[in-house]
Amino acid sequence: MVLMGVVQISTYCELKTIKTNNNCGGKMKRAFLIGKNVYLRPLEREDLKGPYSEWINDLEVTRYMEAGAFPVTNDDLETYFEQNLSSRNSVIFAIIVKKSEKHIGNARIYNISWVNRTAVRGIMIGDKSAWNEGYGLEVINLLSEYAFKRLNLNKLNSGTSADNIGIIKVNERAGYKQEGILREEYYIEGKYCDFIRWGLLKSDYLSLNEFK
Ligand SMILES: CC(C)(COP(=O)(O)OP(=O)(O)OC[C@H]1O[C@@H](n2cnc3c(N)ncnc32)[C@H](O)[C@@H]1OP(=O)(O)O)[C@@H](O)C(=O)NCCC(=O)NCCS
């Protein structure tokens, strides 16, 4: 059943929403959601031994993430992976660049409420050489497509530090709206900073993308 879903959503994104650039040298193994330059596949246990464990311990990558406060061991990653795997309220993907087949980060939809049809969206591009290439926006659009059209969610939430200009730009471009500010909620690099709560409704997303 899950495998059928894989085929359907990949085809849907390729054909209908995010046009696929066929000029990609890689094989796109287990591709689940396919964008122009990147695709999302399931995060596998073997990925825990790759660059992921470097990213999550890199204070520059995790500067704006709660994950960065303590060192992360391979056992911690295993536990996190198992928790995601065993939960139907969380979906985690590896982000892969089509041309190079390089794993550059992870993305997640989690805290899914099947009653309220809400979830939280998370993204970490851990490979710093892949920042500012437009991949972040592409990934977030793929997650929106999946959340609204496959999982039948109604709203995605995102929380950012008010200093995280990169994710703020990406959220705005993806149609997210600011819904509130929690003052001095985060402590980042020696100072308190505000937390911005963002939301993207299914209707926001459809009105932005339906006729493109
Ligand atoms: C935040 C993140 C997802 C953005 O992804 P990305 O692929 O680099 O984003 P894009 O290339 O789509 O767009 C980034 C935009 O933000 C800008 N930007 C990024 N960091 C910036 C900074 N510190 N100051 C000013 N602008 C910045 C870029 O210049 C670019 O703007 P432009 O298109 O007008 O030139 C990625 O950098 C990342 O994962 N960072 C580490 C983890 C993280 O912070 N996750 C979010 C936690 S809420």
Image: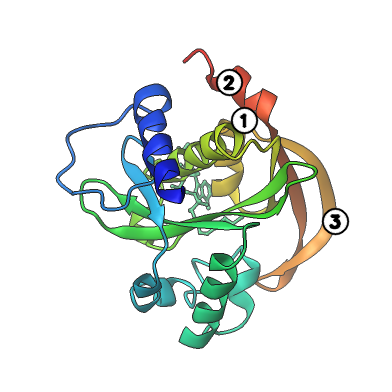
Q: Give the spatial CA distance, label 2 vs label 3.
A: 30 Å
Instruction: Kindly indicate the quadrant of the structure image that contains residue 53.
Output: bottom left
Dot 1 lies on which element?
loop
Query: Which label is found at residue 183?
Result: 3
> Which comes sooner in the sequence, label 1 or label 2?
1
Q: Is residue 51 left or right of residue 61?
A: left
Up/down of 102 relative to 48, above or below: above
Q: What crowding class fits label 3: few (fewer than 14 Cα within 10 Å), some (14-19), or many (20 or more)?
A: few
Q: What amino acid does circle 1 point to?
A: Gly
55 shown above or below 209: below
Residue 4 x, y percent position in the rendering = 41, 42
Q: Residue furthest top?
A: 211
Kind of residue at disc 3: Arg
Q: Is residue 82 above or below residue 23?
A: below
Question: Which residue is denoted by mark 2 in the rendering?
Answer: 208
Determine contact: label 1, label 3, CB under 8 Å.
no
Query: 208 or 59, which is in the foreground?
Result: 208
Q: Residues at badges 2 and 3 in contact (C-beta under 8 Å)?
A: no
Residue 99 lies, in percent from the top left, at 21, 46
Furthest residue to the left? 25
- Residue 84, by quadrant, is bottom right
Residue assigned mark 1: 175
Query: Given contact means CB atoms under 8 Å apart, are the residues at marks 1 and 2 in contact?
Result: yes
Instruction: Indicate the position of residue 154 as horizontal and vertical percent values.
Output: 70, 34
